[in-house]
Image (spheres, coloured by chain):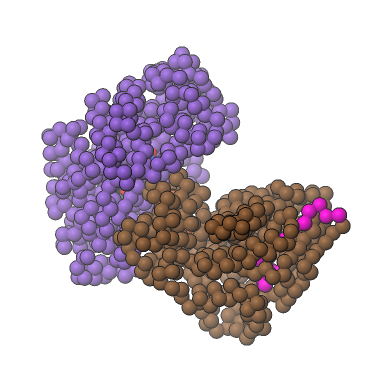
Amino acid sequence: MLQKEIINELVKIIGKENVITGREDLLCYSYDATPDVPDPLPDVVVTPSNTGQVSQLVKIARRFKVPLYPRGSGTNLSGGTVPLKGGIVLSLLKMADIVEVDAENLTATTQPGVIIQDLNNAVAPHGLLYPPDPGTVATATMGGSVAECSGGLRGLKYGVTKHYVMGLEVVLADGQVARFGGKTVKNVTALDMVKLFTGSEGTLGIITEIIVRLIPAPESRKTMFAAFNDLSDAGNAVISIVKNKVIPATLEIMDQVTIKTVENFSKIGLPTDARAILLIEVDGIPEVVEREADTVLEVIKNNNGKVQMARDDKERDGLWAARRTALPALAQVKPTTVLEDATVPRSKITEMLLALEEIARKYNLQIGTFGHAGDGNLHPTILTDERDKEEMERVHAAVKEIFEKALALGGTLSGEHGIGMAKSGFLEWELGAGGVGVLHKIKNALDPEGILNPGKMGFNGGTGHE
Amino acid sequence: MSNRLKSIEHEIIKCMKCGNCQAVCPLYKETRAENAVARGKVQLAAAVLSGKLDYTAELAHRFDLCLTCMACVSNCPCGVRVDRVVLEARAALAEKRGLSFPHRVAAAGLARPALMQKGMKAAGIAQSFFFKRGERGMIPRFPVGLDLKRVLPVLAKKDLKEQLPEKNAVENPVMRVALFAGCVTNYVYPGVGLALVEVLNRHGVEVVLPKQQHCCGAPLLIHGIKDTAKEMAVSHVHMFDAAGVDAVVTVCGTCGEAFRHHYPEFLSGQAKDAGKALSLAGRTYDIAEFLTDVVPLDHTLLGPLDTHFTYHEPCHVGRGLGAAGKAEKLLKAIPRATYSPMQDPGGCCGGAGSFSFEHYKLASQVLDRKLRDISGTDAGVVVTGCGSCRIQLNDGLAQREMPQRVLHTVEMLAHSITGAREEGNCNGRQ
Ligand SMILES: Cc1cc2nc3c(=O)[nH]c(=O)nc-3n(C[C@H](O)[C@H](O)[C@H](O)COP(=O)(O)OP(=O)(O)OC[C@H]3O[C@@H](n4cnc5c(N)ncnc54)[C@H](O)[C@@H]3O)c2cc1C
Ligand code: SF4
Ligand code: SF4
């Protein structure tokens, strides 16, 4: 338990009702959406309502050298908000105002606790869109998604969160408030600190305001679905679509384990004998969409795929429902769902898919793979039971091998879910000692006491389960 | 330790902590506190199971914070029955810690039909002493443990069982059904029961009203008083089985769920009662289901109603009984009536039985969302399928000085059938 003195100081700043210390409540901030990581209790949870309060809270943490963990909706999949070393969880959910929608400059300014979907609802009447759309778009916060640099289904054409963040207000580890970037399309002033804090996973500062770029919502779209009897055909189709200069908004894949599970779960008539399914959506100006859809159809045929085009919104919704059921369906098979984030260059997607099948066989595990094939971002999903110690060991070994393979193919540890605690142990494989050294120098410069989110991204004795 | 939580462990471990429930939980939307959302509650139950937490008073308060609206259940990718986890946790807590005084009194009352009958009569008389009559209902005169502003319905002078005969026959009936009225309909809105008889009789359906019926037991179950709820189940299963009817019809989703889900579960261990409970469960229908799936609404009976209405789907009709959209479809068949759907017809109104009594402020916040949704439709009448929702909606409408009236689905249909000039008439019947 934190000393009474510290609690009193916190109460002085934000009032008793915003300082949570009951054991029952603390327990509810010991986890996020990550399976198989420790879940220690924080000592206290604080819920400030403005930047000034955040700054004062950080100063207290600094003065007493107490760890501080920023938290949005706690939906991340890398153990990013787990209060590993006790201390203060700083929930930003009460800072949830959309400060401004600037339709003329195509920007929006939000506080960190705004839910991504709420922002989209607010900009839709202006015919605008904020493209990053993680699976958790209806629950995740702007702050959490910027800190995690999350991606989503539209990643291939529209990129990830960092491609939309234009400006940030950040409370630094010493309590100072800094602002970087802004509304201008061009901004090359000094070092690109906006990018540095985007994806910093709460280890470098607390994000208290965000300016994002919006885009005109696409006028029209076409959705289709293709089944393949051969995994390589599916992989080649993915590569070939882009080679033919079509960048679909979405290009998703489901492997056979996933198809079978989804079909078994929701009986929507998926071809369970197919080795893979692709789900493709092109969007934009109607004439262009027509042409691009034709090209995609052609490519699929040339790669022995059987294609089906959604004729209306209802059929389109049906196809998306199939994709959206992937995780739920897999999650119902076994109690523990280890969702990984292996990402390779697009040209290596077939190889990665085959490797995943091999790894499942080798470790005798059930792995369903789905994901954003178009950007090489796969989500191999291991179905297991946390209580089965022996199987969990095989799971850990398999996870390790999945990352080894992804890196060997020129890929990365994380396409969108971040490093957190779960993957910190593998960082050096990708960045080398030199790269990791740079991370530590930056961390030490900005947070010399190591109070911000210790144990994540390899800082301050981070430890995953490996 | 607790066999209760152990028995529900399979639900608890299914939760993958994805947080999807945050998008739909009405209490989370208001509080944005992790302990209020389904994920938090499931994890609290897990912590008790693993011995990390004790059955503390604080824990009991946390589990109080749930409307059992099941919004989380229908949005959960893993199919976690959060409502069952919450109810089992409440039962375990009640066992370990005992009940609060008001809950004990309520339990004793609800469990004894005769006493309840007397009590409600006395309450009807005493009502005018404790409450003054407002335009919309009764307003407490003294702080009687209720919020002073709260508008409550007027208890009926004659309850439904006094107003209706046991048997409401028609010539050559196509079917015989038993009406399970439930407390609110019986004591507060007997007009709903009368309307049901009207509508079903016109469809050639005979309606019996077993006079010994009492509370379905769900309010006890919801407060963790499982054993008494079970006794009440036994009594109803015997009574309705003996009625020898083709179906049981309910006018409240929670009562419907009691017959369809809870009774078979309670009696599963008791060989001969289990069969009866299952058989009854198989032929229990909410009135909206009955008129959709069993004896379909006869559109030729419907007369025009010049009314502009919207519909609030009670949680336990829509999600609990899986009858979402059925009432709307029936109501849309009424000639000349204009229907404006709410943005979120199935969003909880915050009533949730006694939740709104115990957590008036929070419940009112949840209700405010609903009221905004209602006023966005410009409708003059709000139709719903549950008495408890109606009490809650009426209170909110009165507090916000909104002009809308609230009717039960079957009352609206009765108006259309009997040619009542306008929907407001129904209030005269109460
Ligand atoms: C079912 C499911 C599907 C998902 N699908 C996707 C997907 O398609 N794409 C994807 O990229 N991710 C996905 N995720 C992961 C997760 O939803 C995203 O990373 C999301 O953006 C996290 O947002 P959050 O508000 O929950 O943040 P949290 O989990 O609360 O926090 C995430 C990180 O950000 C830090 N943080 C939070 N707020 C701040 C702040 N204001 N300042 C500084 N640091 C902060 C935290 O310390 C933590 O390190 C999915 C998760 C689940 C459970
Ligand atoms: S949606 Fe279901 S699985 Fe996800 S956190 Fe809520 S209860 Fe758990
Ligand atoms: S039942 Fe309703 S109130 Fe209770 S946790 Fe689920 S969504 Fe929230």
Q: Quadrant location of residue B125?
A: bottom right
Q: Which chain is brown?
A: B
> Relative to B9, is A299 above or below?
above
Q: Residue A97, image x and y in percent?
A: 40, 55
Left or right of residue B150, residue A117 in this image: left
Residue B120 can be seen in this image:
no
Left or right of residue A249, residue A201 in this image: left
> Relative to A130, is B260 above or below?
below
Q: Residue A179, image x and y in percent?
A: 26, 49
Q: Quadrant location of residue A215?
A: top left
Q: Residue A317, image x and y in percent?
A: 54, 35
For the point 32% across and 63% down, which residue is it? Answer: B53
> Relative to A464, is B171 above or below?
below
The reply to whether the magenta stretch includes residue B93 is no
- Which quadrant is home to the C terminus of chain A? top left
Q: Which chain is purple?
A: A
Residue A90 can be seen in this image:
yes
For the point 83% across and 49% down, which residue is it? Answer: B300
Furthest residue in direction front, as rendered? B271
Q: Which residues are magenta?
A: B172-190
Using the image as rendered, state which of residue A220 and residue B280 is in the foreground: B280
Using the image as rendered, state which of residue B230 and residue A321 is in the foreground: B230
Furthest residue in direction top, as rendered? A302
- Which quadrant is home to the N terminus of chain A? bottom left
Q: Residue B425, image x and y in percent?
A: 76, 66
Using the image as rendered, state which of residue A256 and residue A281 is in the foreground: A256
